[in-house]
Amino acid sequence: MIQVFINPNKKDWSALLARPSFDASTLLPKVQAIINEVRENGDEALLQYTKEFDQVQLKSIALNESSKANAEAALSSSLKSAIQLAKGNIEKFHLPQLHKMDRIETMPGVWCWRKSIGIETVGIYIPGGTAPLFSTVLMLGIPAKIAGCKNIILCTPPSNDKGEIHPAIIYAASLVGVTHIFTVGGVQAIAAMAYGTATIPKVNKIFGPGNQYVTAAKQLVQQTGVAIDMPAGPSEVCVWADDAAIPSFVAADLLSQAEHGVDSQVLLVASNESVLANVQTELEIQLAKLSRKEIAAKALENSKAIVIENSLEALELINEYAPEHLIISVENAEIIAEKVINAGSVFIGNYSPESVGDYASGTNHTLPTNGYANAYSGVSVDSFVKKITFQHLTERGLVNIGNAVMEMASAESLDAHGYAVAVRLNDIESKM
């Protein structure tokens, strides 16, 4: 079911921790062809690709107002309440991220400051298919709204043969202030948001998860100057468990990640073989009960369980792996969590399942995967703003700093740089 390794040698860690490889280069020609077609033929290409890939013949890709009204009526009151609770928690966590930086006087008369301005138009891609991710609408739409983005464009494929969008996606989008919703998915949606069509506005930055085709499309449009949220790969979780862990909890956490897709990866780091055996027993029991057990079972085949008895070495291995999600189910979990340096999001203790972060605790679930947590952060309000720096010098300020600037410009043989200061200093001196 899951590959097991006992106290592996450090020299083998790199190979052991490698994610399942996928050669995206084989996709690129086809993905680029779709992008080119959308750039050239716009909405006509979008409708044609929706018919070809989603088997739906649409008259329009723009969501009509009646669909928005019907979406709320289609959802149970309990689901709407759950979405509203999640929205409240996500807002509470993200609102303090938007703060005004004070003006700093770096030396007398030299003032510097920075201002955050929301990216004017952003695009959000929400996958449909077997698991319509309405929770991702909250995770992306809420910080975009807080950041002050004026136009929030959402693209998602039709979820059924009638060409409709899942009502929970529509409801969540309306709740968080998404400005436009379009029934289009896949590579063609990324291309439409990147370059614009008659119906879909061109965006400045694209956010959201997707399959290998969507990921390849985001990477290709990024090369032409369209910003994207972060590099992405299949979703993943690492669970670190010792005798303080509850095996049924650990198994449930591993399976909740494995059911995302066959390319998902889970990693169990266990302190001893007894912990591993108990978790394996629970995995078999719980897997049999899942509605997506075939998907989860396939993901487990790509996954690994590693026994490392030394806790310092276990932490070192986890930091090298740099997991998207890290669950720490060990004794003194809160203290140990402070030593984590590479992870997208950390869940501390036996009663902090990854599921709460996926939906409603308040933190963002759009996180770096594939080891990128060693250099990238998850999505936040910062992801939706650009920061402009300002400086304002008084005459006194330029006098105080001018000689240093001219000296540095001269050392770099940039005479005009120095003259731009000197001409002003001469003007100041003439008035004294």
Image (spheres, rainbow, N blue to C red):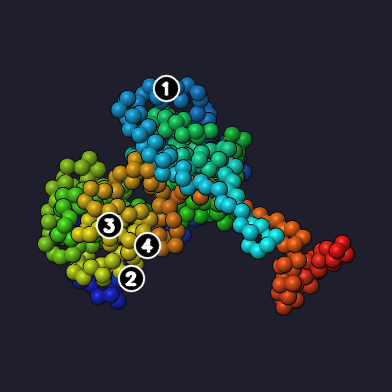
Question: Decide: marks 4, 1 in contact (CB < 8 A)?
Answer: no
User: Is residue 31 visible to the viewer in this orientation of the structure?
Assistant: no
In the rendered structure, find residue 14 and report the number of the disc placed on it. 2
Quadrant location of residue 417?
bottom right
Q: Are marks 2 and 3 in contact (CB under 8 Å)?
A: no
Precedes in sequence: disc 3 or disc 4 = 3
Query: Is disc 3 surrounded by few (<14), some (14 to 19) or many (20+) residues within 10 Å?
Result: some
The residue at 75%/62% (across/down) is: 396
Quarter residue 320 falls in:
bottom left
Please, what is the three-letter code of the amino acid marked with disc 3? Glu
Q: Which residue has dot 3 on it?
A: 334
- Dot 3: element: helix
Q: Earlier in the sequence, mark 1 or mark 2?
A: 2
The mark nearer the N terminus, 4 or 1, is 1
Q: Are marks 1 and 3 in contact (CB under 8 Å)?
A: no
Q: Amino acid at mark 1?
A: Asn
| Badge 2 amino acid | Ser
